[in-house]
Image: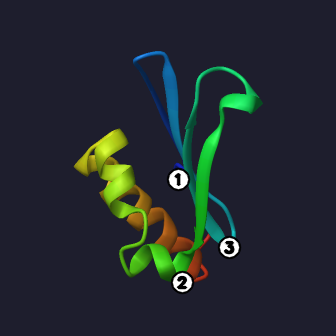
Amino acid sequence: MARSSWQVVRGGRTYYVDVTDHEVICGSHAGSEASDEAGACSHGEFLAGRFQDVVRGDHGDDTVVQVLAAVKARTSGDVI
């Protein structure tokens, strides 16, 4: 199964991206639910550019490419 979740810890925060069956969720937290800050968008919105700059800033270009591939696989009906 291809990757559908990414995270990196930097400066006391955990930055994450999750690709679900219907949306892309990206955010960060400092170790508790109370510190969580996140946003979500549909696959189509992500493919159109929404939150790609956030993912790039938090995780880098390689992760954007990987997330795009995961979204495209899910929207094409392929099993990842």
Q: Which disc, if any, is residue 2? A: 1
Q: Is residue 37 visible?
A: yes
Q: Which disc, if any, is residue 27? A: none
Q: Nearer the viewer, mark 3 or mark 1?
A: 3
Is the residue 37 above or below the residue 14 in the image? below
**Distance from label 3 to label 1 (Cα)?**
16 Å
The quadrant in which residue 21 appears is bottom right
Q: Name the residue under label 3.
A: 22
Residue occupying image coordinates x 59% and y 57% = 39
Is the residue 5 above or below the residue 75 in the image? above
Secondary element at image label 2: loop
Q: Residues within 10 Å of mark 2 (few under 14, many from 20)?
A: few
> What is the residue that sits farthest to the left in this orientation?
61
Q: Name the residue under label 2.
A: 76
Q: Position of residue 63 (x, y in %)?
A: 34, 48
Quadrant in which the C terminus is drawn = bottom right
Q: Which three-letter amino acid code belongs to the residue tagged 2?
A: Ser
Disc with the residue nearer the chain's start (3 vs 2): 3
